[in-house]
Image (cartoon, helix red, strand yellow):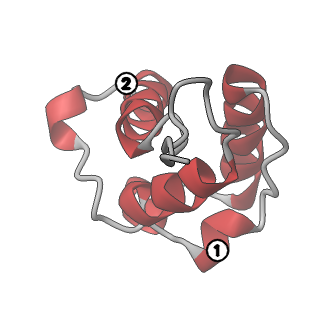
Amino acid sequence: MSEGVEPIQEWMVDYLSKLLQISRDEIDVSSPFDRFGLDSAALVGMTGDLSDAFGIDVDPTLAYDYPTIEKFAQQIARQLPARPGDAVKVAA
């Protein structure tokens, strides 16, 4: 399994909280990005910073296919490489 959805969601909530200058509590991970007034430039910036933070390439158009923090984070988590120790051991 990968790093998981939670760290990605937390990163995105922190990012949007700082960007929009609002409390983390005001950010509902199930709300669409457009509820926060994010335009395409803001989404491209966010995905670029997310790419840097997690060491993967994130296609900015994914934000349109997965338009909430929750859904977007789930999709990104699928792209993260597995960490050592996460593999399921199979008895021989």
Spot occupied by residue 87 in the image (x, y as percentages of width and height)? 55, 39
Q: Residue furthest front?
A: 92
Spot occupied by residue 32 in the image (x, y as percentages of width and height)? 39, 68
Q: Which mark is residue 75?
A: none
Q: Badge 1 is on which residue? A: 64
**Given the image, on which type of amino acid does mark 2 rest?**
Gln
Residue 81, compared with residue 74, is above or below; it is above
Label 1 element class = helix
Q: Badge 2 is on which residue? A: 21
**Given the image, on which type of amino acid does mark 1 rest?**
Tyr
Q: Is residue 81 left or right of residue 5?
A: right
Q: CA distance from mark 2 to mark 1?
A: 23 Å
Q: Nearer the viewer, mark 2 or mark 1?
A: 1
| Crowding near the residue tagged with mark 1, few <14, some 14–19, many ≥20 C-alpha atoms within 10 Å | some
Q: Nearer the viewer, residue 41 or 71?
A: 71
**Residue 66: quadrant of the picture:** bottom right
| Residue appearing at x 78%, y 27% in the figure | 55
Q: Residue furthest bottom?
A: 65
| Crowding near the residue tagged with mark 2, few <14, some 14–19, many ≥20 C-alpha atoms within 10 Å | few
**Residue 39: quadrant of the picture:** bottom right
| Residue appearing at x 49%, y 27% in the figure | 15
| Residue appearing at x 61%, y 52% in the figure | 76
Spot occupied by residue 77 in the image (x, y as percentages of width and height)? 55, 49
Q: Is residue 32 left or right of residue 26?
A: right
Q: Earlier in the sequence, mark 2 or mark 1?
A: 2
Q: Nearer the viewer, residue 4 or 7?
A: 4
| Residue appearing at x 49%, y 52% in the figure | 73
